[in-house]
Image (cartoon, rainbow, N blue to C red):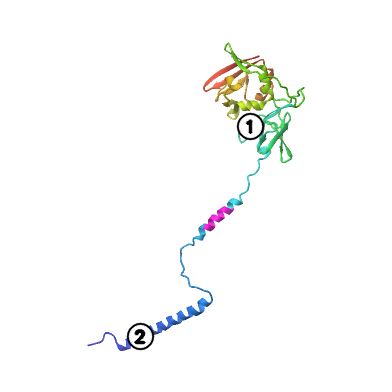
Amino acid sequence: MKHPFKSKNIKTLITILILMLIVKMAWFTVEMTLLRAKGVDYMKTSEAKALYYRTRFASQKLNQRHIEKAKPVSDIHSFKLLAVYHSPTRTIVTVSKAGKSSVLVRGDKIDGYVLDDATAHEAIFLRGGKRYRLGLVENGKGPKSKSSVKYIHENSPAGEKKSEPIGEVTEGDGITVVDRSLLEHYSKNMNDIWKNIGIREIRKDGKIKGFKVNFVKRGSDFAKLGLRRGDVIKAINGQELDSYNKAFEIYKNIDTMEDLTMKVMRGKEEMELEYEIN
C-alpha cells in the first residue's frame, strides 16, 4: 500500500509553515515596539468621504453672505423732473424713477434726497450736506426746455398764514356747489389733497392720457364731488390732462376759477361732472 504523501514533502511543508510563523512573530514584535513608540498607528484606509466636508461648505456660504456689497445709493440722474411749481410760499415737483412717478412738496424725501427748493426749470435737493440740481425735462427736449408752469411771484410774504373759515361742497336743486374758500384752502395746502384722494397717471404709447383715482376718502370733499375709485380724470374745464405741467397749471389757477367741469371716464362710459363755484 502506497502512502498519499511522501515523508520528504511533509517535512518541507512543515518547514515552510514554521518560517512563516517566525516572520509573523517578528513583524508583530517590531510593530509593538518601534511603530507605537514613534506615535504612528495603523489605520485602515477608507474611500468614504469625511462628514466635515459638508460643515465646511456651509461655513463658506455664511462667509460669502457677510462680504456682500451694500446696494449703491440712487444717483440724482436716475430721476426725471416731469413738472415743477414754485412760488415764495409753495414748492411742488413731480419726479419719476423707473416708470414710477411721485409728487413732492418742500421737505419731502425720496431715496435719501430732500426737496429743498426749485426754480422755473429745476428742482434742488439736499443729501449729505450737498445740493443737487435736477433739470426739467419736457417731451425729451432736455433740461433747459421751457415749462408751461412759470415762476410765480406772490405779493403775500413767505410763511404768512391766514385763518379763514373753510367752506364745503353742497348739493342744491341738482347742482353741486363748491365754496370758493375751499378751493383757496386746497390751492395753498396740497398735502390736504393727498390725505383725501390718491391719483396716478395713465399712459398709452408712453404719453399721459389722464389721471386715475386710486382711492377717495369716505366723506371727504372729493367724495362729495362725485369722484369714485377707478375714475380716470381726462380733462378739467376743457383742458386735456396729458402732462403734469398742465395739471399743475390748473392747480395754480384753481382758486380763481369761475366754474369747474371735469371730464371723467368711468369704466367704458365718459361723463362730465359740473360744479358751480360760489
What's the residue at 30%, 88% (across, down)?
7
Query: Residue 26: image x %, image y %?
Result: 45, 82
Q: Does 211 sit left or right of 116 as displayed?
A: left
Label of residue 14 in the image: 2
Q: Which residue is at a point 34% across and 87% down the rendered structure image?
A: 11
Q: Quadrant of the N terminus?
A: bottom left
Looking at the image, residue 29 lies above or below residue 165: below
The magenta stretch is 55-63
The residue where tag 1 is placed is 102
* Most common SS among magenta residues: helix
Secondary structure under the numbered disc 1 in the rendered image: strand
**What kind of element bears circle 2?**
helix
Picture quadrant where residue 162 is located: top right
Disc 2: CA contacts within 10 A as few (<14), some (14-19) or many (>=20):
few
Task: Point out residue 201 in the picture as x, y percentages from the top left corner.
Answer: 60, 28
When asked about the image quadrant of residue 115, the answer is: top right
Q: Quadrant of the C terminus?
A: top right
Relative to 133, say whether 212 is above or below: above
In the rendering, at what x and y percent does residue 217 appear?
58, 25
Q: Is residue 158 magenta?
A: no
The three-letter code of the residue at mark 1 reads Ser
Q: Residue at x 32, y 86 (%)?
A: 10
Of the pair 170 and 98, the residue shown nearer to us: 170
Upstream in sequence: badge 2 or badge 1: 2
Mark 1 surroundings within 10 Å by alpha-carbon count, few (fewer than 14), some (14 through 19), many (20 or more): few
Tell me the CA gap for discs 2 and 1.
103 Å
Which residue is painted at 50% across and 80% down in the image? 33
The residue type indicated by label 2 comes to: Ile
Note whether residue 254 is visible.
no
Numbered mark located on residue 50 in the image: none
